[in-house]
Image: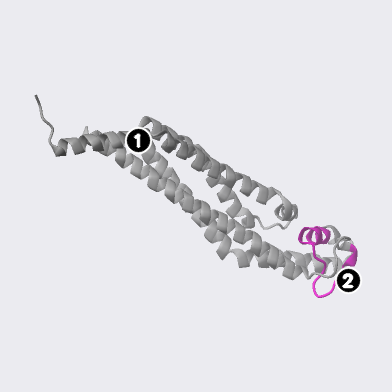
Amino acid sequence: MKTFDSTDAYRGHLSSCLRNFSNSNFRATYHLSETLLAGSAVIAFGLWFRFGGTMKDLSSEDKSPEYFYVGLYVLVGAGALMMAVGFFGCCGAMRESQCVLGSFFTCLLVIFAAEVTTGVFAFIGKGVAIRHVQTMYEEAYNDYLKDRGKGNGTLVTFHSTFQCCGKESSEQVQPTCPKELLGHKNCIDEIETIISVKLQLIGIVGIGIAGLTIFGMIFSMVLCCAIRNSRDVI
């Protein structure tokens, strides 16, 4: 009869633990819930931000800054990719496939780079975006003063979007101001405040999701190594 020493017992126990780890439904659920839900949230946030509220009103203008939305487009694309690769992670965990898990890790690495780029772009490009929108407003403002009908629609859009009226004074452009607006709000200042807050939010979301992506990358590599080690032990 063959006897097992302590080393054999340890190897057998390690093999059992590693197999239980790789077969765990909780780990597969992580890939579905964490990655898919995060991807869905990113897509929803990006689309809402792009086509709702302030951004929607600005995009209707002929001179709207398209580069202003680049970060949102990248964020939405990263969210869609996160949802797609979530299935790879689930399949890799359930089938104990190192190849699929390796592909999952690579895709997460690409997503991580895109999300970090979005966050950095939002923070660094904030000043440029603010100046561009302020310039758009000043052009519409001056056009209205020269010809009361020429810049009327654009100025109304700016005033309703940012809930402001004029620059130093609102008297010259009062007909284009929101009726519900109480008191005078300098549009140059309001543009800076609102755009700054929104871009900071985009940056925070991008960096935050990138942080979650790191955990997914770490987990996929740990699981991949666990599967390989369990097969080596066996």
Circle 2 SS class: loop
**Which residues make up the magenta segment?**
154-175
Q: Position of residue 9 (x, y in %)?
A: 18, 35
Residue 38: quadrant of the picture: top right
Residue 160 among magenta residues: yes
Q: How many residues crowd mark 2 within 10 Å: few (<14), some (14–19), many (20+)?
A: few
Q: Which residue is mark 2?
A: 172
Specify the farthest residue to the left.
1
Amino acid type of the residue tagged 1 in the rendering = Ser
* x 22%, y 32%: residue: 234
Along the viewing direction, whichever of 39 and 1 lies nearer the viewer? 1
Percent position of residue 152, x then y: 86, 60
Residue shown at 86%/71% (left/top)?
170
Q: Look at mark 1 in the image and give the residue it sits on.
A: 22
Q: Foreground: 97 or 4?
A: 4
x then y, percent, for residue 50: 67, 50
Q: Horizontal placement of 172 versus 189: left or right?
A: right
| Residue displayed at 62% across by 45% down | 44
